[in-house]
Image: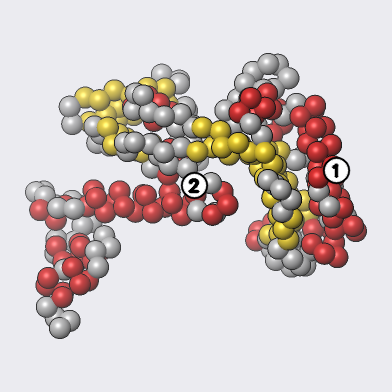
Amino acid sequence: MLPRRHAARRYRPAGGSITAIFADGSEAGGDLLVGADGVHSTVRVRAFPGAPAPVCAGYVGWRGVIDETAVPPAARGELLESYAFYLPPREMFLSYLQPGADDDLTPGRRRMNWLWYHPVNAAALKDMSTDASGRAHAAIPPPLIRLDVIAKFRQEARAILPPQFIALTEATPNAFFQPIFDLQSPRLVAGRAVLLGDAAFVARPHVGAGVAKAALNAARLTDALSVGAYLEDPPRAGLKPDPVMLMQAIGVPLRDIPEVAATRR
Protein backbone atom coordinates (compact mmCIF):
# COMPACT_ATOMS: atom_id res chain seq x y z
CA MET A 1 0.00 0.00 0.00
CA LEU A 2 1.38 3.38 -1.00
CA PRO A 3 1.70 6.05 1.70
CA ARG A 4 -0.69 9.00 1.65
CA ARG A 5 0.62 12.03 -0.13
CA HIS A 6 0.32 15.54 1.28
CA ALA A 7 1.18 18.91 -0.21
CA ALA A 8 4.39 20.42 1.15
CA ARG A 9 3.88 23.86 2.69
CA ARG A 10 7.28 25.03 3.90
CA TYR A 11 10.84 23.95 4.58
CA ARG A 12 13.22 24.34 7.47
CA PRO A 13 17.01 24.02 7.07
CA ALA A 14 18.88 22.82 10.14
CA GLY A 15 22.65 22.53 9.93
CA GLY A 16 23.46 19.48 7.86
CA SER A 17 19.85 18.58 7.06
CA ILE A 18 16.60 20.01 5.75
CA THR A 19 13.00 19.33 6.81
CA ALA A 20 9.79 19.57 4.78
CA ILE A 21 6.56 20.46 6.63
CA PHE A 22 3.40 19.14 4.98
CA ALA A 23 -0.20 20.36 4.90
CA ASP A 24 -1.32 17.80 7.48
CA GLY A 25 1.35 18.97 9.93
CA SER A 26 3.66 16.00 9.40
CA GLU A 27 7.36 16.47 8.71
CA ALA A 28 10.07 14.64 6.78
CA GLY A 29 13.77 15.37 7.03
CA GLY A 30 16.85 14.39 5.08
CA ASP A 31 20.19 15.46 3.68
CA LEU A 32 18.71 16.97 0.51
CA LEU A 33 15.35 18.37 -0.57
CA VAL A 34 14.62 17.70 -4.26
CA GLY A 35 11.93 19.89 -5.78
CA ALA A 36 10.61 17.88 -8.73
CA ASP A 37 7.05 19.06 -8.23
CA GLY A 38 6.30 20.58 -11.62
CA VAL A 39 5.87 23.98 -13.17
CA HIS A 40 3.89 25.30 -10.18
CA SER A 41 6.52 24.00 -7.76
CA THR A 42 5.95 24.65 -4.06
CA VAL A 43 9.64 23.99 -3.42
CA ARG A 44 10.64 26.76 -5.83
CA VAL A 45 8.29 29.26 -4.20
CA ARG A 46 9.21 28.39 -0.61
CA ALA A 47 12.90 27.52 -0.81
CA PHE A 48 13.86 30.08 -3.47
CA PRO A 49 12.43 33.48 -2.40
CA GLY A 50 12.04 35.77 -5.37
CA ALA A 51 12.15 32.94 -7.90
CA PRO A 52 10.28 33.78 -11.12
CA ALA A 53 6.73 32.55 -11.55
CA PRO A 54 5.61 30.69 -14.67
CA VAL A 55 4.67 33.10 -17.47
CA CYS A 56 1.77 32.50 -19.85
CA ALA A 57 3.23 31.72 -23.28
CA GLY A 58 0.22 33.20 -25.09
CA TYR A 59 -1.56 30.02 -26.11
CA VAL A 60 -3.10 26.83 -24.75
CA GLY A 61 -3.34 23.26 -25.96
CA TRP A 62 -6.91 21.97 -26.21
CA ARG A 63 -6.75 18.18 -25.93
CA GLY A 64 -8.84 15.07 -26.17
CA VAL A 65 -8.61 11.28 -26.46
CA ILE A 66 -11.30 8.93 -27.77
CA ASP A 67 -11.48 5.24 -28.56
CA GLU A 68 -10.69 4.34 -32.16
CA THR A 69 -14.21 2.99 -32.59
CA ALA A 70 -15.60 6.41 -31.62
CA VAL A 71 -13.77 8.27 -34.40
CA PRO A 72 -16.61 9.58 -36.64
CA PRO A 73 -16.90 8.54 -40.32
CA ALA A 74 -16.02 12.07 -41.45
CA ALA A 75 -12.56 11.64 -39.90
CA ARG A 76 -11.79 7.92 -40.15
CA GLY A 77 -10.63 7.71 -43.76
CA GLU A 78 -7.98 10.43 -43.56
CA LEU A 79 -6.96 10.41 -39.91
CA LEU A 80 -6.91 6.85 -38.59
CA GLU A 81 -3.60 5.74 -40.09
CA SER A 82 -2.01 9.17 -40.34
CA TYR A 83 -0.09 11.58 -38.15
CA ALA A 84 -2.18 14.50 -39.32
CA PHE A 85 -1.51 18.25 -39.08
CA TYR A 86 -3.46 21.40 -39.85
CA LEU A 87 -1.58 24.71 -39.76
CA PRO A 88 -3.76 27.80 -40.18
CA PRO A 89 -2.18 31.17 -39.22
CA ARG A 90 -1.08 31.14 -35.54
CA GLU A 91 -2.73 27.76 -34.93
CA MET A 92 -1.65 24.13 -35.00
CA PHE A 93 -3.83 21.03 -34.81
CA LEU A 94 -2.51 17.48 -34.84
CA SER A 95 -3.90 14.01 -34.31
CA TYR A 96 -2.42 10.53 -34.06
CA LEU A 97 -3.22 7.03 -32.91
CA GLN A 98 -1.89 5.74 -29.61
CA PRO A 99 -2.14 2.39 -27.81
CA GLY A 100 -5.37 1.47 -26.10
CA ALA A 101 -5.76 -0.15 -22.69
CA ASP A 102 -2.76 -2.26 -21.62
CA ASP A 103 -0.73 -0.84 -24.54
CA ASP A 104 -2.95 -2.64 -27.02
CA LEU A 105 -2.08 -1.72 -30.63
CA THR A 106 -4.68 -4.00 -32.22
CA PRO A 107 -6.71 -2.11 -34.86
CA GLY A 108 -10.05 -1.24 -33.35
CA ARG A 109 -8.68 -1.17 -29.79
CA ARG A 110 -6.41 1.84 -30.15
CA ARG A 111 -7.17 5.42 -29.20
CA MET A 112 -7.06 8.67 -31.15
CA ASN A 113 -5.28 11.55 -29.48
CA TRP A 114 -5.65 15.12 -30.71
CA LEU A 115 -4.17 18.45 -29.71
CA TRP A 116 -5.04 22.00 -30.80
CA TYR A 117 -2.59 24.82 -30.00
CA HIS A 118 -4.75 27.92 -29.91
CA PRO A 119 -3.78 31.56 -29.11
CA VAL A 120 -4.98 32.74 -25.70
CA ASN A 121 -3.58 35.80 -23.91
CA ALA A 122 -2.92 35.98 -20.17
CA ALA A 123 -6.20 37.71 -19.32
CA ALA A 124 -8.25 35.19 -21.28
CA LEU A 125 -6.34 32.30 -19.70
CA LYS A 126 -7.12 33.63 -16.23
CA ASP A 127 -10.82 33.68 -17.08
CA MET A 128 -10.71 30.20 -18.64
CA SER A 129 -8.95 28.87 -15.53
CA THR A 130 -11.64 30.19 -13.16
CA ASP A 131 -14.30 27.65 -12.21
CA ALA A 132 -18.03 28.25 -11.77
CA SER A 133 -17.57 29.08 -8.07
CA GLY A 134 -15.17 31.91 -8.94
CA ARG A 135 -12.01 30.12 -7.80
CA ALA A 136 -8.98 30.70 -10.05
CA HIS A 137 -6.66 27.74 -10.72
CA ALA A 138 -3.06 27.67 -11.92
CA ALA A 139 -4.03 24.53 -13.85
CA ILE A 140 -7.76 23.95 -13.69
CA PRO A 141 -8.90 20.30 -13.34
CA PRO A 142 -10.82 19.27 -16.49
CA PRO A 143 -14.15 18.61 -14.65
CA LEU A 144 -14.12 22.20 -13.33
CA ILE A 145 -13.83 23.92 -16.72
CA ARG A 146 -16.94 26.09 -17.08
CA LEU A 147 -19.57 25.10 -19.63
CA ASP A 148 -19.32 28.49 -21.35
CA VAL A 149 -15.56 27.96 -21.86
CA ILE A 150 -16.25 24.58 -23.48
CA ALA A 151 -19.01 26.13 -25.61
CA LYS A 152 -16.64 28.85 -26.86
CA PHE A 153 -14.00 26.23 -27.66
CA ARG A 154 -16.50 24.30 -29.79
CA GLN A 155 -17.66 27.47 -31.53
CA GLU A 156 -14.07 28.43 -32.41
CA ALA A 157 -13.30 24.89 -33.57
CA ARG A 158 -16.25 24.97 -35.98
CA ALA A 159 -15.08 28.35 -37.33
CA ILE A 160 -11.39 27.49 -37.79
CA LEU A 161 -10.83 23.76 -38.27
CA PRO A 162 -11.47 21.58 -41.35
CA PRO A 163 -14.41 19.11 -41.30
CA GLN A 164 -12.30 16.09 -40.27
CA PHE A 165 -10.96 17.79 -37.17
CA ILE A 166 -14.29 19.40 -36.33
CA ALA A 167 -15.82 15.91 -36.35
CA LEU A 168 -13.02 14.66 -34.11
CA THR A 169 -13.50 17.41 -31.53
CA GLU A 170 -17.29 17.00 -31.61
CA ALA A 171 -16.88 13.28 -30.89
CA THR A 172 -14.84 14.09 -27.78
CA PRO A 173 -17.15 14.63 -24.80
CA ASN A 174 -14.43 15.55 -22.30
CA ALA A 175 -12.16 18.01 -24.09
CA PHE A 176 -9.87 20.01 -21.81
CA PHE A 177 -7.08 22.56 -22.16
CA GLN A 178 -3.43 22.63 -21.08
CA PRO A 179 -2.02 26.09 -20.33
CA ILE A 180 1.41 26.60 -21.91
CA PHE A 181 3.91 28.35 -19.67
CA ASP A 182 7.51 29.51 -19.90
CA LEU A 183 9.81 29.23 -16.89
CA GLN A 184 13.55 29.70 -16.51
CA SER A 185 14.98 29.64 -13.00
CA PRO A 186 18.15 31.68 -12.39
CA ARG A 187 19.22 29.28 -9.63
CA LEU A 188 18.70 25.56 -9.11
CA VAL A 189 20.41 25.14 -5.73
CA ALA A 190 19.72 26.93 -2.45
CA GLY A 191 21.52 25.37 0.48
CA ARG A 192 20.23 21.82 0.68
CA ALA A 193 17.33 22.36 -1.75
CA VAL A 194 17.60 21.67 -5.49
CA LEU A 195 15.12 22.01 -8.37
CA LEU A 196 14.65 19.40 -11.10
CA GLY A 197 12.50 19.03 -14.20
CA ASP A 198 9.68 21.47 -14.87
CA ALA A 199 10.15 22.98 -11.41
CA ALA A 200 13.37 24.49 -12.76
CA PHE A 201 12.84 24.97 -16.51
CA VAL A 202 9.90 24.34 -18.82
CA ALA A 203 10.33 22.91 -22.30
CA ARG A 204 7.28 23.69 -24.43
CA PRO A 205 5.40 20.51 -25.43
CA HIS A 206 6.20 20.76 -29.15
CA VAL A 207 9.58 19.11 -28.58
CA GLY A 208 8.06 16.36 -26.43
CA ALA A 209 11.06 16.51 -24.10
CA GLY A 210 9.61 17.25 -20.67
CA VAL A 211 9.91 13.70 -19.30
CA ALA A 212 13.32 13.16 -20.89
CA LYS A 213 14.58 16.45 -19.45
CA ALA A 214 13.43 15.53 -15.95
CA ALA A 215 15.06 12.10 -16.21
CA LEU A 216 18.36 13.61 -17.37
CA ASN A 217 18.22 16.14 -14.52
CA ALA A 218 17.79 13.29 -12.04
CA ALA A 219 20.66 11.33 -13.58
CA ARG A 220 22.99 14.34 -13.39
CA LEU A 221 22.04 14.93 -9.76
CA THR A 222 22.86 11.30 -9.00
CA ASP A 223 26.25 11.75 -10.68
CA ALA A 224 26.99 14.89 -8.65
CA LEU A 225 26.05 13.22 -5.37
CA SER A 226 28.27 10.24 -6.18
CA VAL A 227 31.47 12.22 -6.78
CA GLY A 228 34.00 11.32 -4.10
CA ALA A 229 31.67 8.78 -2.51
CA TYR A 230 34.30 6.02 -2.72
CA LEU A 231 36.43 7.96 -0.20
CA GLU A 232 33.87 7.84 2.60
CA ASP A 233 34.41 6.04 5.90
CA PRO A 234 32.40 4.04 6.68
CA PRO A 235 31.84 3.02 3.04
CA ARG A 236 28.45 3.80 1.58
CA ALA A 237 26.24 0.70 1.43
CA GLY A 238 26.22 -0.94 -1.99
CA LEU A 239 28.92 1.30 -3.47
CA LYS A 240 31.88 -0.29 -5.20
CA PRO A 241 35.11 0.96 -3.59
CA ASP A 242 37.08 1.07 -6.84
CA PRO A 243 37.11 4.73 -8.03
CA VAL A 244 37.46 3.69 -11.67
CA MET A 245 34.38 1.50 -11.42
CA LEU A 246 32.55 4.34 -9.70
CA MET A 247 33.43 6.83 -12.43
CA GLN A 248 32.24 4.38 -15.06
CA ALA A 249 29.01 3.83 -13.14
CA ILE A 250 28.16 7.55 -13.05
CA GLY A 251 28.66 8.09 -16.74
CA VAL A 252 32.13 9.63 -17.14
CA PRO A 253 33.47 8.90 -20.67
CA LEU A 254 36.10 6.17 -20.61
CA ARG A 255 38.63 8.44 -22.32
CA ASP A 256 38.48 10.75 -19.28
CA ILE A 257 39.45 8.00 -16.83
CA PRO A 258 43.30 7.82 -16.86
CA GLU A 259 43.48 4.22 -15.68
CA VAL A 260 41.14 3.13 -18.46
CA ALA A 261 42.49 5.45 -21.15
CA ALA A 262 46.00 4.03 -20.64
CA THR A 263 44.79 0.59 -21.66
CA ARG A 264 43.06 1.84 -24.80
CA ARG A 265 46.08 3.34 -26.54
In depth, the one of 136 and 14 nearer the eye is 136
Task: Name the foreground residue: 89 vs 22.
Answer: 89
Residue 256 at x, y percent in the picture: 18, 68
Q: Which residue is mark 2?
A: 203
Look at label 2 and name its amino acid.
Ala
- In this rendering, position of residue 165 left or right of residue 144: right
- Check disc 2 and report its element: helix, strand or loop: loop
How crowded pointer 2 is (Cα within 10 Å; few <14, some 14-19, many 20+) is rated as some
Question: What residue is shown with label 1?
Answer: 158
Q: Residue at x 30, y 27 (%)?
A: 19
Check disc 1: other Cα within 10 Å, few if <14, some if 14-19, many if 20+.
some
**x 77%, y 40%: residue:** 174
Viewer-closest of 3 and 43: 43
- Its colouring scheme is secondary structure
Q: Is residue 36 left or right of residue 188?
A: right
Give the x, y percent position of residue 223.
Answer: 26, 54
- Classify residue 123 as left or right of residue 10: right
- Looking at the image, is mark 2 or mark 1 earlier in the sequence? 1
Q: Residue furthest right?
A: 73
Q: Who is closer to the viewer here, 99 or 27?
A: 99
Is 13 above or below relative to 189? above
Residue 40 got which mark? none
Above or below residue 76? Residue 129 is: above
Calculate the distance from the C-alpha at mark 2 to the C-alpha at mark 1.
Answer: 30 Å
Q: Quadrant of residue 82?
A: bottom right
Residue 134, image x and y in percent? 68, 16
